Image: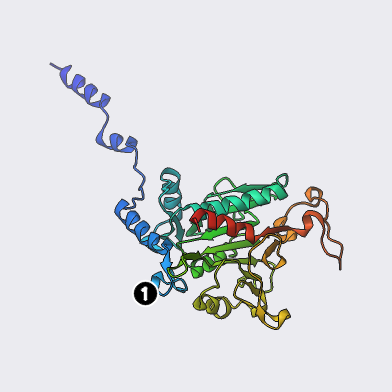
Amino acid sequence: MSRQPSQQSSQLASQPSDSSQLTFQPTREKRLHLSSAAIESAREKLLTFQKAREEGEEVNEEEEEGYTGSREITIKENVPLEEYLRYRENNMNTSVRMYLCDGKIKIYEVPSAPHAEVAGAIIGFMSIWNMQDFRYGTDATTTLGRGSCREPDVYVRPRHRPRPQQGAPAADRYGNAFPTMMIEVGFSQSLPDLHRTAIRYLGQQTTIQIVLAIKIFGIRTNALTNTSTIALIAALYLRTSPTPLVPTRVISFGTANPDTNTVNYITQQMNVPPGSFVGVGRPDPNNNNNNFPPCNAANIPTYTMNIPGTELFDGVPANHLPAGFPIVPNTLPVGFAAGFNLDLYELQVVVREALNI
């Protein structure tokens, strides 16, 4: 009889207590959930901005070609950066493009042939120009600040650009250096949305030097002539400019003149000087203010956008710079130092073929 209590106590001692069970239970990390219905609703709305419009057709203000508001759709707020990054790693939604801006998840674009093929063409042209010194990529999640990140349509990073030192901002969780150039192509998103994106890319948390924004407007159809035309805008931003948040060059390169509201937004809100906004539908001050020639062939100087070599190779050690560096003072740069000349007519052809116009 005297042994029973000791056996019971021994059995009790061998059993784990409630507190020890709680200690070893795995904790579940909070997972971000985005409603598929909200994503689909945003997608359907953004698709309306890609539709062809008959000239003179009345549409809602947000659907107008020259709309100067934002078309981005916020689907969730107060989202921590780490939570969003974890979501993107596990949920690469291909039906829409989204990003995190100051803790808000915004949907801004629907993938399409013209959008994708313009981005692909730029990579192809630049790769032909220089493949050995650069890495070209798409859709890599890039951190832009404490509560912001985005996947660019195209990025260009010098192979020998040093990784940031420990503690300095990096482009991603792998510690990569920021690209020197970001390229954004907008079809659903408005021109102001693209402009604000360029400003974010050139923020103090990054070392991005160049942003190229390409805006594809909607197709204009003319029932009387059975023709279709389209306006296209390219805007180049340089961190080294005295006014980095104002494009150094804006070129209209479509088959239609830009909308009046678009012109006013570029000159009055983006503050682009008239002489820096050239191309289709724009007056040429060197030709009695007659309009610039149409963008209807390759190698027309007006429709060539130079991407400067100095900014493209920013941060690359001298022993890894190609021929043409250093640039001799008071002389024009040569070789790769002269940069890359993007023929916008070639992009116009890509857009017209993708849209079958």
User: Total number of numbered labels?
Assistant: 1
Task: State the residue in front, 59 or 159.
Answer: 59
Task: State the residue in front, 347 or 99.
Answer: 347
Give the quarter of the image for residue 144.
Answer: bottom right
Is the residue 71 above or below the residue 22 in the image? below
In the rendered image, residue 21, in percent from the top left (x then y), is placed at 29, 34
Residue 223 appears in the rendering: yes
Which amino acid does the dot numbered 1 rest on? Glu
Task: State the residue in front, 335 or 161.
Answer: 335
Q: Which residue is mark 1?
A: 58
In the rendered image, residue 194, in percent from the top left (x then y), is placed at 52, 65
Q: Name the residue at 56% across, 62% down.
A: 214
Task: State the residue in front, 295 or 150.
Answer: 295
In the rendered image, residue 58, in percent from the top left (x then y), is placed at 37, 74
Crowdedness near tag 1: few (<14), some (14–19) or many (≥20) residues, C-alpha within 10 Å: few
85 horizontally vs 241: left or right:
left
209 horizontally vs 66: left or right:
right
Is the residue 169 above or below the residue 131 in the image? below
78 horizontally vs 113: left or right:
left
Residue 71 appears in the rendering: no
Q: Secondary structure at mark 1?
A: loop
Which residue, as the protein is rendered here, is positioned at the far bottom?
288
Q: Name the residue at 18% across, 22% down.
A: 8
Q: Name the residue at 47% across, 68% down.
A: 225
How is this picture coloured?
Answer: rainbow
Which image quarter holds the N terminus? top left
Which residue, as the protein is rendered here, is positioned at the far left?
1
